[in-house]
Amino acid sequence: MIETIKLRKDFKEKTVVEDVDLYLDKGESVGLLGPNGAGKSTTISMISSLLKPTSGDVKLNGESVVKHPSELRKVLGVVPQEIALYQELTAYENLKFFGRIYRVPKDKLETRIQTTLKLVGLKDRQKDRIKTFSGGMKRRINIASALLHHPKVLILDEPTVGIDPQSRNYILEMIRQLNEQSGTTILYTSHYMEEVEQLCDRVYIMDHGKVIASGSQSELLSILSNEDTMRVQLNQMSHSLVKAIQEIDVIRQVEETGDGIKIIAKKSTNLISNLVKLADQQNIKILNFQMENPSLEDVFLHLTGRTLRD
Amino acid sequence: MIPVFLAQLTKECRNPLLLIIFIAASIGATIIFTDGTQSPTTVSIFSEEENARSIEEKWEPLLNEDSDMRFVITDSEEAREDVQQGRADLAIKLLEDDYRLVTTSNLPTVAYVDQHVRKVFEKEATIQSAIEQSEDAEGLRADIETKLEDPPMEMEVDSITGDELPNYDMGTQLMFAFTLLVAMFIIGFRINNILKDKVYGLWDRMILSPVSKTGMYTAYIAYAFFIGVVQTLSVILTFKYVLNYDIGDRLDLLIIIIAFFTFSMVSVATLLTGLVKKPEQFYAIYPSVIPIIPLISGAYMMPGTISNPVLTFIADLFPVSHAMDAILNVVMYDGTLHDITHSLLFMTLIGVVAMGIGVNLVERRKN
Ligand SMILES: Nc1ncnc2c1ncn2[C@@H]1O[C@H](COP(=O)(O)OP(=O)(O)O)[C@@H](O)[C@H]1O
Ligand SMILES: [Mg+2]
């Protein structure tokens, strides 16, 4: 439905987005995951026709939208990263404003506003001014404002930044509903991998302006399929043991945790017996031993050597 | 476009205090500053030279000749104290051939008195220097006096209607000057909403909607225009009908002038908006630039007081000097539409040029 071709953006000398190819199929829910400053917002500004790419193209059903954005804008709803609302107006007035500028027919506007307010769970607060709302409520109205014209594609830029877990779950659930029940195509941007894991069919991982990995979650996790992550609980901590373990050739990383160590290693048959032997030699007891499922966070760590929130 | 306009209006109605304060301030300032402006009835004069008596006696009749003010010889201590205590706006200290103003304020009154006194001194200096060349000093003086009374060549100064030239009313001029100043502030702040809404991301949201960019600019500009006209008119009508100021009978012409001025000023504000990056910068720069404009336009002073060509040139680039010209023409000299066409054209020109450059600059900030 929407695809980008070698999308690139330079600000002065600095390249902020480079060679980004991504696509959204109808009805999909796609995540764009990356740390702060990765270039996510810049990318979606170009996709939504707010920012002209330095080079590359954005296509809607095969037609370039960079020169003629109007077809795209008709089907698009964008939830910006910032709270783009009139703080002095009430929730209802804000929604009415966006409904009107999106030319929602007059006879439908009132019901649309009410159903949208219900969807975001703020029907009973509609007469209150935005500036009296909590962060989470503002975020919800920020999303609601992009829904009044029933967009076929919804782009959300970090819609859960800085809010309480309850509001966050509410928002995620709401987006899932839009995707599953109304068939809205979703492009969801975040630097929280749990959200993307929970919500998205496919994921693009961005870092330093480039897409460094993409695919369904299982595809991404299979990047780590020839590695194991395990937690080993010890009766006492020993630096010489850590050193000795690092010597084993299949070991990629050893990390001290509170009560033991976390190990990432290539899959191998005799790793565990090796560990036990080394611990025995130093008179250290292994109290517990646990294999961990890798997460997207681990994928990112594997690809960049950094965590998402570095 | 209409929803954008209405959103601004609703916002204003939610928070009308600022607008009300502005309107009240311009009315208040006019009343305070014009109180007794026209001509103070008496002005103390004194001298502290050695021959104080003779100096005082020489100038007292000259100053009082041809003036509706009364210049009274006063003890120097007393005169100074009156000024210090605020009982008098000013006093005049006489020297042999010169004078000094004793004042703590720069109220328009002071400029008004100063103008009269300077004229008297200059005339006397001219006569003096002529006499010095002459044998028959007394005869020549008498001759000059009669010539001045009844000059061989005369320049007729008539009002357009041929009536007596009206007494110049500084109070009314100040009223308009303050009103326009406050209008400039309000218009500027409203145009700055474009920048504010850009920072908050509202602008981008509107761009993504079916509203055209022209429609968006039109809405903001129309709103600033609307609020500027509402403010100016409510002040002027208050003065006319509540405080009974004499602003002439041509309210229609005044409304036309205000409309042209507001349009022109909206454009200038748009231009200034285009020159800054952030709304905060606008808040810092605009209020420090704007009050200077009417000052160098001479809006607070008797017409013709400012004659520095650089200052008048700068002032002419802003609409307020043309608006004041036109308003004074209508109010004081019963000017007609024909008489103010020139000023209206100037304001239109400023408006069109500034709007063109301004909108382009605001757009350029985008990428
Ligand atoms: N208008 C701009 N001018 C210059 N640099 C910019 C501009 N917008 C964004 N950047 C830079 O581009 C990089 C990516 O920004 P952004 O797309 O907002 O990242 P993200 O949304 O992933 O946090 C950042 O380093 C940011 O400083
Ligand atoms: Mg961002």
Image: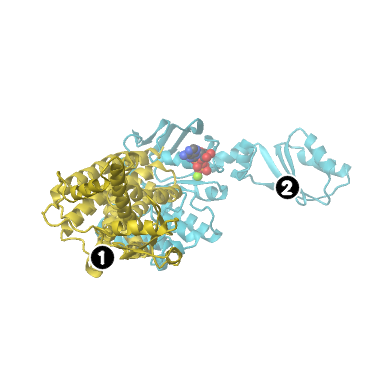
* Residue occupying the point 27% across, 53% down: B225
Q: Colour of chain B?
A: yellow
Q: State the colouring used for the structure image.
A: by chain
Tell me the chain of label 1: B
Chain corresponding to cyan in the figure: A
**Which corner quadrant holds the C terminus of chain B?**
top left
Report, in whole angstroms, how far the alpha carbon at label 1 lies from the one at label 2. 83 Å
Q: Amino acid at mark 1?
A: Phe
Q: Is residue B247 visible?
A: yes
Helix, strand or loop at label 1? It is helix
Tell me the chain of label 2: A
Could you tell me residue B359's position as x and y percent?
A: 32, 41
Front one among A309 and B154: B154
In the image as oriented, which residue stretches furthest toward the left? B162
| Left/right of residue A19 with respect to residue A76 in the rendered view | right
| Left/right of residue A131 with respect to residue B174 in the rendered view | right
Could you tell me residue B324's position as x and y percent?
A: 26, 51
Query: Which residue is tagged 1?
Result: B239
Could you tell me residue B11's position as x and y percent?
A: 35, 60
When the figure is inspected, residue A115 is found, relative to residue B204, above or below; the finding is below
The CB of the residue at mark 2 lies under 8 Å from ligand 1: no
**Dot label at residue A231:** 2
Q: Amino acid at mark 2?
A: Arg
Helix, strand or loop at label 2? It is strand
Badges 1 and 2, same chain: no
Q: Is residue B7 visible?
A: no
Could you tell me residue B334's position as x and y percent?
A: 15, 55
